[in-house]
Image (cartoon, grey):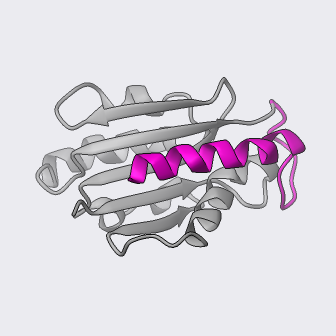
Amino acid sequence: MKKIKVIGCGNILAFDEGVGIHIARRLRSEILPEWIKIEELSNPGQMLPELIIGSDKLLIIDACRNEGFIRRYSRGNGDISSILTDTIHAVHLSSMFELKDKKYAKKLPEEIVVFGVKISGETKKFGVGLSNEVFASLDNTINAILQELY
């Protein structure tokens, strides 16, 4: 079986910007096989190689300001930064992948899938929770992620 890591990015205290964390927590409530691990990343600086090394596939969930999207990257096929460009938090991870790619090239996931969840343009709002619009989109996003896992 493929080892899969799912990383929800966001700031849980910054309203809609925490959508990746909310989705990761909802996914934890699902009955998932042991080869799927769910992680939270509240600070892109926390992205340690240990979070991704040894997984065959990595799913990153983050907020975006544009239309929602699903982007795919296969190692050796394109530029990792191009699939992270429109995310709010995960965009900072591209440098980690590029630096670590040289040192950990054989240990990085073969495939990376990024799920961008559209949030409102208001990014200075603080508080735990999600806007009605983002909350209403969760089921569709979670279903797309579950389809990707299986």
What residue appears at the point 14 percent right and 49 percent down from the top-left corner? 105
Q: Majority secondary structure of the magenta segment?
A: helix
Outermost residue on the left side: it is 106
What residue appears at the point 84 percent right and 35 percent down from the top-left corner? 122
Compared to 12, does 69 lie above or below? above
Residue 63 horizontal/vertical position (percent) = 64, 41
Tell me if residue 130 is in the magenta stretch: yes
In the displayed structure image, the side of residue 72 where residue 129 appears, left or right: right
Q: Which residues are magenta?
A: 121-150
* Residue 89 in sight in this render: no
Tell me if residue 80 is in the magenta stretch: no
In the displayed structure image, the side of residue 64 where residue 111 appears, left or right: left
Residue 21 horizontal/vertical position (percent) = 63, 59
Compared to 72, does 13 lie above or below? below
Residue 3 horizontal/vertical position (percent) = 27, 63
The foreground one among 89 and 83 is 83
> Disc count in the image?
0
In the displayed structure image, the side of residue 60 where residue 87 appears, left or right: right
* Residue 54 in sight in this render: yes
Q: Residue 77 falls in which quadrant of the image?
A: top left
What residue appears at the point 63 percent right and 57 percent down from the top-left corner? 23
Quarter of the rendering occupied by the N terminus:
bottom left
What residue appears at the point 16 percent right and 57 percent down from the top-left corner? 107
Compared to 1, does 101 lie above or below? above
Compared to 78, does 99 lie above or below? below
